[in-house]
């Protein structure tokens, strides 16, 4: 019986496991995840502003293992040896016939221990819990979001919504290293989002970065100081440590460059945020839709390989994206059309409910959204 190891129980890894289970073949599938649960990341910022219960944004991987017929190994992978076909954890070494790397991405503090120890990350439900606890204690006056990508913008607007509901006045500022927020997005979207942030009283500091955090003060380049500051660090991501050690071709974030079949070595596939798929300047962004499709395709190609059939090329379909804003004036591009306003906010939540798993989680999200609603500025 062929043994398949999947590293990571997020969107990509679970999609691969689901497809393998449907194949009808007798396979031994081991899925490794360092945590016992998987998080529904797209709604994490909303759980600050709209206070969606984090319980409904977590999936118990052990529970899913029965549905998808894999063996769940709650262990962190520390090394992979491609030549020997070995996956190593602190507990043991495992041999595979086929490997699927789907370990996602994690916050990149760019080797700055001062910031790593004192800033808040926003990459898991546990990170959000820490932010929610600090907000409940009302210890901070200034909220410095480091990183003006879509997660930074989403976080800032959700903090705004949180304070609006509590009747508190706090300073929220987005600090962005480059000359503008929302990097490669179309100009109209940047203008729309920028106007929106201004309307909420959220400041934007461009060509700037948080240099250090000391005694509760955030020191921004140019010497600007924010006292009693909560710094939320969303300035970049990187891949897992074991990937850094692999001598395969990667992009600067450490994402593994895969071929048209999502392969990167003998019997090795990579999918989700860890995979860098594309050509020239047209690589896929990190997104749920691509993670699920790639996980599925990697599994299809493993099954085809076992059957000695030619592998299938991965042909991604881009349904679009939304930049969610907590004042309900989101914007984005769906099916090739520009969308903005309440409709795009609704589309964001519909996508999240659709992508979520299980009736309990879906109902929890819907009830949370109905109860908490949003706000206009
Ligand atoms: C705040 C936020 C908001 C987002 N909003 C959107 C959105 O609105 N729309 C959208 O399309 N995308 C959004 N994304 C991006 C989207 O969530 C990711 O593209 C998607 O989660 C990637 O799926 P994945 O399976 O590759 O990784 P993940 O979902 O991150 O899963 C990776 C899994 O691997 C495990 N793992 C990591 N390292 C190891 C190891 N060494 N050993 C064992 N297990 C390991 C982790 O514990 C994790 O469970 C958002 C991301 C964030 C952080």
Image: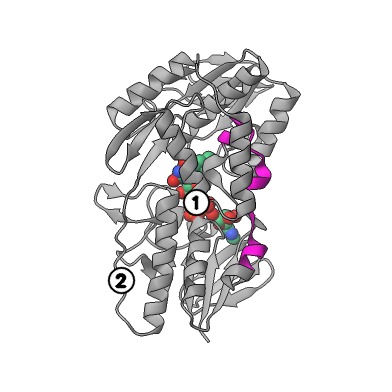
Residue at horizontal 56 percent and vertical 34 percent from the top = 46
Residue 33: x %, y % from top left: 61, 61
Q: Is residue 262 above or below residue 122?
A: below
Q: Is residue 54 above or below residue 177?
A: below
How packed is label 2: few (under 14 Cα within 10 Å), some, or many (20 or more)? some
Among the 4 quarters of the image, the one containing residue 229: top right
How packed is label 1: few (under 14 Cα within 10 Å), some, or many (20 or more)? some
What label sits on residue 355 in the rendered view?
1
Is the CB–ligand 1 distance for label 2 below 8 Å?
A: no
Indicate yes or no whether the magenta region holds residue 47.
Answer: yes
Residue at horizontal 32 percent and vertical 56 percent from the top = 316
Residue at horizontal 53 percent and vertical 14 percent from the top = 224
Q: Which label lies toward us, 2 or 1? A: 1
Q: Earlier in the sequence, mark 2 or mark 1?
A: 2
Residue 280: x %, y % from top left: 24, 51
Q: Residue furthest bottom?
A: 1
Give the labeled residue for mark 2. 312
Return the residue nearer the eye: 292 or 284.
Answer: 292
Residue 57 in view in this figure: no
- Judge from the rendering whether residue 269 lies leftward or rightward of residue 316; answer left or right: right
Residue at horizontal 68 percent and vertical 46 percent from the top = 55
Residue 15: x %, y % from top left: 49, 63
Pointers 2 and 1 in contact (C-beta within 8 Å): no
Return the residue nearer the eye: 356 or 105.
Answer: 356
Residue 220: x %, y % from top left: 52, 20
Q: What is the magenta range? A: 45-65
Dominant secondary structure of the residues highlighted in magenta in the image: helix
Helix, strand or loop for disc 1: helix
């Amino acid at each position: 019986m062929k043994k398949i190891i999947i590293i990571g129980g997020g969107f990509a890894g679970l999609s691969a496991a689901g497809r393998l289970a449907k194949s009808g073949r007798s396979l031994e599938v081991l899925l490794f995840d360092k945590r016992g649960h998987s998080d529904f990341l797209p709604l994490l910022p909303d759980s600050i502003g709209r206070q969606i219960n984090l319980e409904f944004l977590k999936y118990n991987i052990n529970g899913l293992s029965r549905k998808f017929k894999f063996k769940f190994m709650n262990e962190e992978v520390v090394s992979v040896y491609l030549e020997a076909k070995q996956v190593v954890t602190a507990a043991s070494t495992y041999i595979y016939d086929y490997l699927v790397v789907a370990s996602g991405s994690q916050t990149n503090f760019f080797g700055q221990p001062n910031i790593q120890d004192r800033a808040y990350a926003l990459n898991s439900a546990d990170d959000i819990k820490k932010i929610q606890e600090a907000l409940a204690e009302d210890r901070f006056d200034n909220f410095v979001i480091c990183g003006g990508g879509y997660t930074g913008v989403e976080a800032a607007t959700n903090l705004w919504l949180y304070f609006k509901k509590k009747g508190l006045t706090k300073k929220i500022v987005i600090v962005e290293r480059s000359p503008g927020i929302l990097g490669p997005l179309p100009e109209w979207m940047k203008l729309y989002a920028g106007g929106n942030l201004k309307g909420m009283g959220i400041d934007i500091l461009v060509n700037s970065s948080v240099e250090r955090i000391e005694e509760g003060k955030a020191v921004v380049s140019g010497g600007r100081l924010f006292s009693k500051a909560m710094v939320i660090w969303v300035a970049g991501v990187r891949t897992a440590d074991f990937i850094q050690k692999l001598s395969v071709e990667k992009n600067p974030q450490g994402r593994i460059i895969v071929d048209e079949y999502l392969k990167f070595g003998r019997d090795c596939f990579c999918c989700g945020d860890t995979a860098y798929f594309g050509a020239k300047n047209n690589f896929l962004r990190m997104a749920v839709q691509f993670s699920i499709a790639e996980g599925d395709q990697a599994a299809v190609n493993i099954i085809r390989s076992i059957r000695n059939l030619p592998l299938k090329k991965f042909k991604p379909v881009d349904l679009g994206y939304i930049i969610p804003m907590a004042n309900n004036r989101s914007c984005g591009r769906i099916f090739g059309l520009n969308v903005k306003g309440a409709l795009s906010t609704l589309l964001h939540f519909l996508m999240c409910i659709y992508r979520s798993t299980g009736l309990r989680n879906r109902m929890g999200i819907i009830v949370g959204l109905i109860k908490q609603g949003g706000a206009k500025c």
